[in-house]
Image (cartoon, rainbow, N blue to C red):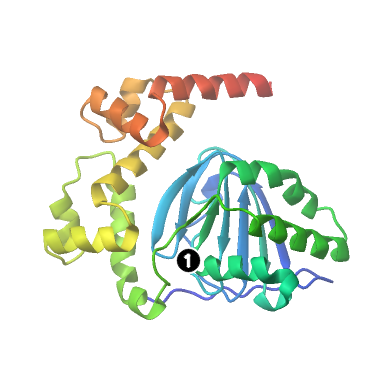
Amino acid sequence: MLIPLERIIPDEGSSFKVIYHDVLPEVFLWNYHYHPEIELVFVFDGIGRRHVGNHVSFYEGGDLVLIGSNLPHSGFGYGALGRHEEIVLQFKKELIQDTVEFEKVNRMLKNAQFGVAFSPETKKALAEDFREMRSLPSFERYLALINILQKLAQQTDFQLLNNALFQQSIFSKDQNRVLRIFEFVEKNYTEVINTQSVADLSNLTLPAFCNYFKKNFGVSFTDFLNEYRINQACRQLTEGKSVSDVAFLCGFNSLSYFSRTFNQFKSISPSEFQNKVYEKKERKK
């Protein structure tokens, strides 16, 4: 199975595309794809999954990620909790001149080949810049894009999501295997999952599977599974279910282990997280 190429058509009267979503996450599919255009994704709030290249992780409180040309990725709304609001900017590298004025921007765009996740502080500072993109005329929108890229290029607090350049020819051979692993976790995270069973599913020995997963995704399979379960737990806690019920519904056979694992990934207890959600809902009324 090959990674599908997505064709990007610029907005009418513009040299790049602006996409706005404000929908329930159920409309998003696991649509792993690539395109020659560089992509800048701004998720305004919420919890969800980012999958860029070989990197899989979860964001909380929204996200701001720069994705390089032809770097495969999936939609950030897939598996998100609650309503998903995002703006996506897609533009060709040729839009940015190779001049001294754009030196820092071009350096940042080279880093984009690894995928770049910016800090929450940067995201907060640029929120209004992204919101304004929707209502600007074509020329002003172009200037706004340049301004956003220039601001991002000044930042030093960011994370490269992949350790090495993505090699599509190698990963394409493994895509069926990766998809089987993801689908297995999504369907079975509520049950006891033995790593050996996932290794068997991947047609690898247990040591080979552990090395394969760590090398390709940067974390152990156990940590990936626990983080997936904790993010599903967040969704269920926002629905008003009790902490003890959520723990067992998400595959944890010990309430104390669930609480420790939740705190490990979220730096907050499950009950504190649930209280914060309730407080946020009350403020919105």
Query: In the shown orientation, is residue 166 left or right of residue 140?
Result: left
Residue at 40% x, 59% y is: 55
- Determine the residue located farthest toward the front in the rendered image: 100
Q: Which residue is mark 1?
A: 114
Relative to 218, is 80 on the left or the right?
Answer: right
**What percent of the width, then of the height, locates residue 197?**
15, 54
The answer to whether residue 75 is visible is no
* Residue depicted at x 36% and y 44%: 228
| Quarter occupied by residue 209 | bottom left
Give how far across and how far down residue 43 sits, in percent: 61, 47
Q: Secondary structure at mark 1?
A: helix
Residue at left offset 73%, top offset 77%: 99
Residue 167, compared with residue 84, is above or below; it is below
In this view of the protein, which residue sits in the foreground, 279 or 185? 279
Task: State the quadrant of the C terminus.
Answer: top right
At x 45%, y 34%, the residue is 235
* Callout 1 amino acid: Phe
Q: Hey, which quadrant is residue 241 in on the image?
A: top left
Decide which of 223, 204 is in the foreground and name it. Answer: 223
* Relative to 206, residue 189 above or below: above
Give the number of marks.
Answer: 1
Please rate how many residues cluster around mark 1, counting C-alpha atoms within 10 Å: few if below 14, some from 14 to 19, many from 20.
many
